[in-house]
Amino acid sequence: MQKLVLLRHGESVWNQENRFTGWTDVDLSPEGFEQASRAGKLLDKHGYNFDAGFTSVLKRSIKTLHFVLEELDHLWIPVTKSWRLNERFYGALQGLNKDETIAKYGEEQVHKWRRDPNEHPPEVTHDDECYPGHDIRYKDLTQREIPVTENLSETMERVLPFWSEVIVKAMRQNQKVIICAHGNSLRALIKYMDLLSDEDVTNLDIPTATPWIYELDEGLNTIRHYYLE
Ligand SMILES: O=C(O)[C@@H](CO)OP(=O)(O)O
């Protein structure tokens, strides 16, 4: 039996301000830093250690993983960062306050943008400062890979190649793996791993900095999963 740990980053400044975040590279809030350290202490208390860490190219996840590994005295393990684990790209909603957006567009529409796996948020244009093509960290992406908006199905399409080509490969070499990512990139991964329907995944919300443990058999099929307490 092999264990895999999934962790959503600690609370970010924009989580606290209730703003759509997506690929905006906001920092952890003071509470988010605390949450990350608490998650590390919890993993330590339960005897977890890791051979490899995987995270996005966004600092709220990178720092969360760093603080977890610090608590475990495991800062030395290899950490691979990939844009494929980034949060879902929220298009022109990025930066907007979620309650103000509900007041403007209505609860039903905003709920669809947030949770319907096939609904696209409004697009950003290429001259918008939020367009990732302006950001040097995405310079190696093809034009097709750089999003102007994303629904959960498209997030899943770019998360899965990294999962199967990189993370699964590490686990097949018996490496103990932690993935620190984002609410929606983790929802995409869990949808795939647990074969969740569109309806099931709509109701899945992942709390910040709460380790989600997968117990997997030798074929990496899920035996069970649970939050570590
Ligand atoms: O704003 C975001 O990027 C995400 C995660 O915080 O929000 P939501 O839960 O609405 O998908």
Image: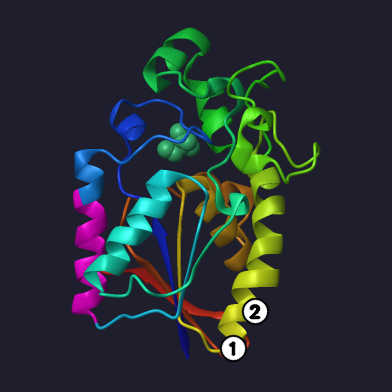
Ligand 1, seen in the image, is in the quarter at: top left
**Magenta extent:** 34-46
Q: What residue type is labelled 2?
A: Lys
Query: In terms of secondary structure, where does tag 1 sit?
Result: loop
- Who's the residue at 49% across and 32% down the image? 24
Structural distance between the alpha carbons of marks 1 and 2: 7 Å
- Who's the residue at 58% across and 91% down the image? 218
Position of residue 44 measured from the top left corner of the image (x, y, whole percent): 23, 76
Position of residue 92 measured from the top left corner of the image (x, y, whole percent): 59, 20
Query: In terms of secondary structure, where does tag 2 sit?
Result: helix
Above or below 38: residue 1: below
- Who's the residue at 60% across and 49% down the image? 83
Disc 2 under 8 Å from ligand 1? The reply is no
Foreground residue among 94 and 107: 94
Disc 1 residue crowd, few under 14, some 14–19, many 20+, Cα 10 Å:
few
Residue indicated by mark 1: 173
Disc 2 residue crowd, few under 14, some 14–19, many 20+, Cα 10 Å:
few
Q: What is the tally of numbered marks visible in this picture?
A: 2
Q: Which quarter shows the C terminus?
A: bottom left
